[in-house]
Image (cartoon, coloured by chain):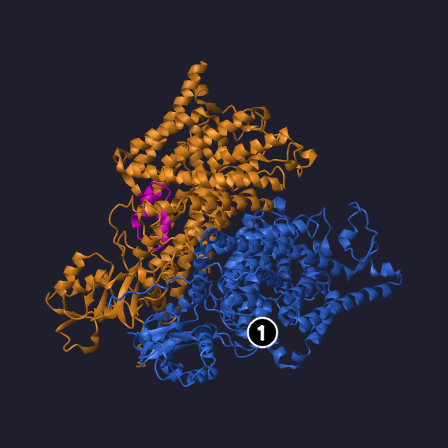
Chain colours: A blue, B orange
Amino acid sequence: MDQEYRLTSPPMTLPQVSRYVDGSTIDFIREEALERERNNVLRAQIGVRGLLLPWFDAARMWLIVILTGIGVGLTGGWLDVLVKWLGDLREGRCSNGLFYNQVTCCSSVKPGELCGEWMTWSAFLDLRNVFAQSLLHSSVYVALAVSFAGAAAILVTTYAPYAFHTGIPEIKAILGGYVLTAFLTPWTLLIKALGLALAVASGLSLGKEGPLVHVACCFCYMLLNLLHFRNSEVQKRKLLAAAAAAGVSVAFGSPLGGVLFGLEELDVFANESEVMWRGFVASAIAAVALQWVDPFGTSKLVLFQVTNGSDTWRAFELIPWLTLGVIGGVLGSILIRINVKVALYRRRSVLNDWPVLEVIGVSAITAATSYLIVFSRVQASELVANLFQECDPTKIDYHGLCNPTAMWENVFLLLLTAALKVLLTAWTFGMMIPSGIFLPTIAIGACLGRAMGLLVQAIHRAYPMAWIFQSCPPELTKRCISPGFYSVIGASAMLGGVTRMTISLVVILFELTGALSHVLPIMVSVMTAKWIGDALGKDGGIYAAWIAMKAYPWLPPVNYQDKKPDLGAQLMRRLNRLILIHDRGETIEKLAALLDKYDYHSFPVVREQEFLGLITRDKLRSALVDDSSNRTRECVFSISDIPGPNAFLDLSGLLEEAVLQLRPEVPKEFVVNMFQKFNLRQIVFTSRGRLIGMTTRRDVVTLLTCQFAHSGALAQERRSWD
Amino acid sequence: MDQEYRLTSPPMTLPQVSRYVDGSTIDFIREEALERERNNVLRAQIGVRGLLLPWFDAARMWLIVILTGIGVGLTGGWLDVLVKWLGDLREGRCSNGLFYNQVTCCSSVKPGELCGEWMTWSAFLDLRNVFAQSLLHSSVYVALAVSFAGAAAILVTTYAPYAFHTGIPEIKAILGGYVLTAFLTPWTLLIKALGLALAVASGLSLGKEGPLVHVACCFCYMLLNLLHFRNSEVQKRKLLAAAAAAGVSVAFGSPLGGVLFGLEELDVFANESEVMWRGFVASAIAAVALQWVDPFGTSKLVLFQVTNGSDTWRAFELIPWLTLGVIGGVLGSILIRINVKVALYRRRSVLNDWPVLEVIGVSAITAATSYLIVFSRVQASELVANLFQECDPTKIDYHGLCNPTAMWENVFLLLLTAALKVLLTAWTFGMMIPSGIFLPTIAIGACLGRAMGLLVQAIHRAYPMAWIFQSCPPELTKRCISPGFYSVIGASAMLGGVTRMTISLVVILFELTGALSHVLPIMVSVMTAKWIGDALGKDGGIYAAWIAMKAYPWLPPVNYQDKKPDLGAQLMRRLNRLILIHDRGETIEKLAALLDKYDYHSFPVVREQEFLGLITRDKLRSALVDDSSNRTRECVFSISDIPGPNAFLDLSGLLEEAVLQLRPEVPKEFVVNMFQKFNLRQIVFTSRGRLIGMTTRRDVVTLLTCQFAHSGALAQERRSWD
């Protein structure tokens, strides 16, 4: 019994970095073991090398974090400049030169003066006829929109198919261990950045936030390769997580929001404050770099600065805000459903073969309908900024929103814009162009919220003495309700309904509004929307829905609770469904045939029923290739009693050592929890040393995504990740 | 083989809440299983009850979160008011009534006018002689300080010994599973709050931040008992974590900082965004409640509002800031060492028997020395607020800090204050009064930083044309260096050196200064201080040092890395060091004797060498007590082959099912990681079904704290937590 366990002496060469093919999943436990081995080798070097090499390793890691921050900040800033220029080009051009946008073109003009340098297309072409002017404007508007969108679609379909969509589902899967190198190439980076600028400028109903996270990750991955970062896949993922935080930081101008997004949505910083710290460093640097570029010429990071009409809010306002929360939850759930339906239809119909034409068609429809409705003619970001503004007599009244006599027209137009944007967004999100869901969602919510604010304001104006408005001081009859803040609440509710994020969303909107007193209403609306949305659909938010449709091996960080108190054994594959390798009796030939027949990632090795260990596919294959001399030689996996060294091929060194074994009696929830916390690839169930069964990550993913109806509907091919 | 595992049908009565005695550790896996069982029972109720009972459960939980937030905010606000009144009483009194503090007393006076209502003690007693005045002032100052401090010490020693110190080490241990009910009683709450006000007002070198976290947890625990919250110990701890976040939120006026403090320092929100969300709700509500009390009459949450002299900083300033980081790391490490030495001396010397006298003596010394030095005469919070201010010709020049001719005097006085405060703080932190370490640390750092700022400013004034100052624009000769911001940097560095926190510290200071552009310098200084501090000592920060000295069973969230690639087997106790229970051959008498002899928490049950399961002490004891009829009856643990039901006492139902078994070959780091992530109580090592050994939490805690020399030096008694 009480036997001594031999310690393996540290090897003096760096361990081989494991290679994974696209579509597989990394083994976190094995990768962490490799990382430990690597660190030990570095530290064990003699003399100064032993001190310097680990230091160089750490310095390279920090260099990547810092360069990623700077790069993402600069990229984000210049993308904003590019989008602004392309967007302005749809309305006119600068007489000083084509490459000035409206703001830089008019920068020399003093405030109050008219800017003569900036000319609409009709003025530039000297058209006088009003009808011709209007025709020219609308056709340039639509034509440029279509050509921008078409160019983006051509770029994406031709050069980098992975540059389509938001990228966040893939990043979530990659950070969870999925291997998808094609998703992070420099080529994808270039196409995604360029295509994103074109797509945003085309006026399609999409945002830049999600794709910027993808761009940040591509940038970081490029640095990893450039600087010969040879650490384990786990370390790479930790750096990618920091890059993702920097991406959010730049997208919203909110460095804390970036860190918390990484924490909540990407679920990467769990228990590792060092990783979180790196994310914080990267996102703070990115924000500073963005501020340095100053793309909006305002020295402000945030596009949607909120001017607070009144610093306080009244309790009765919770009623409209809760209503907004409910609307956000319902509409968010509807948006997700339409989006899923459209994605399925796109895959199954003729659209699948003509992605560029689809983009062109949708952009033409978007441009045409948007041109007709005043609110949607400007870019979505401008619309949102205007909707968030309070009415201020000293400032320009955008779109006549502050005109109390036009209240019903405004409400109607706002609701129409919201409805239109729901449909357009649901269709656009998933086409072959880079597209984020955040900004359109914010725009829809801001429209709804502003409409609600206008309604409440109108009621208050009509019945200022009603008991419900008693808390409004009489001198503030006009300022008691702030429709601009209702917009913010609407946007929060809609975002909560679509993404089902909570804390990071609140922080992002908190950094936007800056008023601590308004955090509570934002929290309430986000929470209500999330509850309603979760109650209405089992999708778990739009990202989880796409992950499930794409069948990525991603473990949702849900708190899995079983209906019945089941055992872990319920989840396992029994012996008769496993492909076993027996300690004796297998020849090289038989094992090679086994490898060809089954593409499982690893095989349990048993002697009779006793569990000896797991052997992975790639280790077994390389051992067989190395020693293919005599294909009928017998293989053994336990070295205890081999008669002669040459009679058998000794494969005992290939068994994985750190395999987690559980008894089948542990609760099912514990098994799921185990997979989630350790990102495991498999758990082996043994009872008194005998193999009972095995559970793989795929089983757990299937269990956790089974409530969503369309799981795997968009999967490309059969993934070999178990 | 492939046998069927029976499913236990859900019981229809709520499971018994497990009871733990003070000093033990909860079993997270078992508690979570109980919680699952409880939820299943609630949901399985028939009809409306099945819907309403889970809802009531959730509603009660949220009610506790919200009430905790409100209660902590109000308590914090009123404590501030009380401290202000007590503090002002040391200098004079209001002629309108004793219970007005200086601000409320003078609230009717218009700005610019002199406040006649507030009278110093000499004016009140109508003393004219200057010498008598000075004598009166200093003696009232010292006498009140001593009596406040003495009163606090008497309250603490007499009524609630656990109300002493900061409380954060204990809260960290409790949230990690330690059971210490006496720490959270309403009595402790009352004494800690009162004693805290008295201690802060006495002018001792301590702060209110840590104790406020303790007060928040006591408040939450009181609510848990009042509302009959009968959920598992794990759920209670999750709510306590939210309360702790609310406490930090109130202490610093920084709700985000509170959440991140919980995340980083208390390490409680790992992987559970719902828990984090509760913490966010509680801390936001607490901040709003504090704002409503408005203790400082400024409508601002933050005491140390920073006025930014210049919005930008220059690269050369990184040199003094890095220097401050190094100083902060070194001084923080020294402070911790002195504090540990003092704590050990206090325990071993005569001071142990006279805690009240010690407090009185130290407070007399503190008051006397502080009265002599102008910077330390005011309360530390006021000093810090003044040091953080930039020099502004339109405002009052506090203490002549902005007088350039008195530069050397100022630097000398600041350094003297810092040195004095280091010694006083190191002694005070650990006496029998409520005392936090944050504020004194900030004060020390602010003094050092301001001194550094003054020095750099003087150099810049002397050599404005030196190449290093080239980046300073010539028109800003006076404003290029902002000594106030150097103060902030000094405070960050000192905090980093003492607490070794990173991200939550930066966020708290970020919410303090509000300027994104200054986040980078704060990050750099905190990081440098942490690196230097970690390099100088193995203590892991002052809280970790106290936890180790008190020998609380707390697993540090460090990323454990082994020197050599050891196996998990290295960490286990071998069979010969375990107390085993054998399946056959044990009688009730023998087992009862075993329980009396060994106070281990659980015992492995084996048949020959085959591992059957674990049985916990309390289950075994209650089973034996229930059935003490025939003390020579034999006990069996496996029901498979019992000849007759009466011949044996069947204890097979008592075996714990969810016991984690590992093979001894798994890496040691994996075992440690497992304990950290799951907060395990024990891991059983088996090989092919045979018991090889066992590792308990104590073994892992010992492993992780062994590098600190004074582990267990302050432990009260032998803890029975393994």
Magenta extent: B162-189
> The N terminus of chain B lies in which quarter of the figure?
bottom left
Q: Position of residue B28 (x, y in %)?
A: 34, 60
Circle 1 Cα neighbour tier, 10 Å, few/some/many (<14 / 14–19 / ≥20) = many
Residue nearer the viewer, B235 or A77: A77
In depth, the one of B536 and A563 nearer the eye is B536
Q: Position of residue A61 (x, y in %)?
A: 53, 56
The part of the image, by quadrant, that contains residue B306 is top right
Q: Quadrant of residue B647?
A: bottom left
Q: Which residue is mark 1?
A: A340
Q: Secondary structure at mark 1?
A: helix
* Residue B408, image x, y percentages: 54, 26
Above or below, B232 against B22 in this view is below
Overall secondary structure of the magenta section: helix
Left or right: where B257 falls relative to A632: right
Q: Amino acid at mark 1?
A: Val
Q: Is residue A607 above or below residue B186?
A: below
Taking the magenta stretch, the answer to whether it contains residue A50 is: no
